[in-house]
Image (cartoon, rainbow, N blue to C red):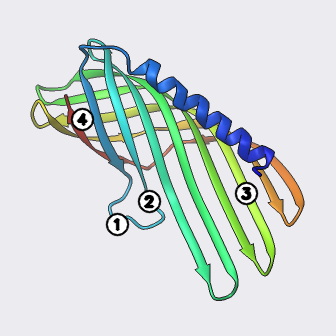
Amino acid sequence: MLNRHTRFLLFCLLLVVLQVPAFAQQTNARKEIGLGFTGLNFNSSNSFSAFYKKEIKENVYRRLSFLVGNINLLNTSNDLTRFDASVGFGIGREKRKALDEKLWFYSGPQWTLNALIVAAKENQRTSNTYNLSTGIGYILGLQHNFNDRWGINLETIPSLSVSYQWDNRSGSESENFSANAFLSNTVRVGIVRRF
């Protein structure tokens, strides 16, 4: 049976997923889908994201982002098993301004919801950590459109967030609440398919 923290996390993610069909009902608007990468060596320290953007009025887009990062499964001969994964969802609005006929600058706010799960078992002792965070960031990006179908973008998202973490270590529980501000130096490279 799932504990109360896992049920709460699944409930939050379900609420987000239920909002997607309402977002996707507009017709005759420009759309973009793509993949974003913070690194290209694909080891566990990198994350990747998928995004969907839909024009809601001229040069204004609604965007949905799905983030996956740090997925690890470790099983050693020392009776240590560890699994960790982080997933996230973002919804935002970006305004675009043409710098020339193919290069666009875009910016706007984005709300995010992220979850991190770390589960470990060593010598019959278990340790589970759950972290749920929400925040708002401001997207700053450049997109170069090669043609009507393909483009590439670079973006960074400075953000503010609050997080709630709870730990369960062999029966004892602890909780922690924190607030953070990021001036990110991470730049995401995205491959864009336009239609």
Image disc number at residue 41: 1
Q: Is residue 164 visible?
A: no
Q: Which residue is found at the position 40% from the left and 46% from the top?
A: 49
Q: Residue flagged by tag 3: what amino acid is it? A: Thr
Mark 1 and 4 residues: CB-CB less than 8 Å, in contact? no
Mark toward the viewer: 4 or 2: 2
Estimate how packed mark 1 is, as few (under 14), some (14 to 19) or many (20 or more) residues with alpha carbons within 10 Å.
few
SS category of the residue bearing label 1 = loop
Which of the numbered marks, if any, corresponds to residue 129? 3
The amino acid pointed to by label 2 is: Asn
Secondary-structure class at tag 4: strand
Tell me, yes or no, whether the two marked residues, 4 and 2, touch with CB atoms within 8 Å: no
Whole-number angstrom distance, CA of label 3 to CA of label 2: 20 Å
The answer to whether mark 1 and mark 2 are in CB contact below 8 A is yes
Q: How many marks?
A: 4
User: Which residue was labeled with disc 4?
Assistant: 143
Task: Tell me where residue 144 appears, x and y as whole percent.
Answer: 18, 36
Instruction: Using residue 128 as the reference point, say whether residue 170 is left or right of it.
Output: right
Residue closer to the observer: 22 or 183: 22
Picture disc at residue 46: 2
As measured in the structure, the alpha-carbon distance from the residue carrying label 4 to the one carrying label 3 is: 38 Å
Tell me if mark 2 has few (under 14), some (14-19) or many (20+) residues whose alpha carbon lies within 10 angstroms of its own: some
Q: State the image quarter where residue 140 is shown.
A: top left
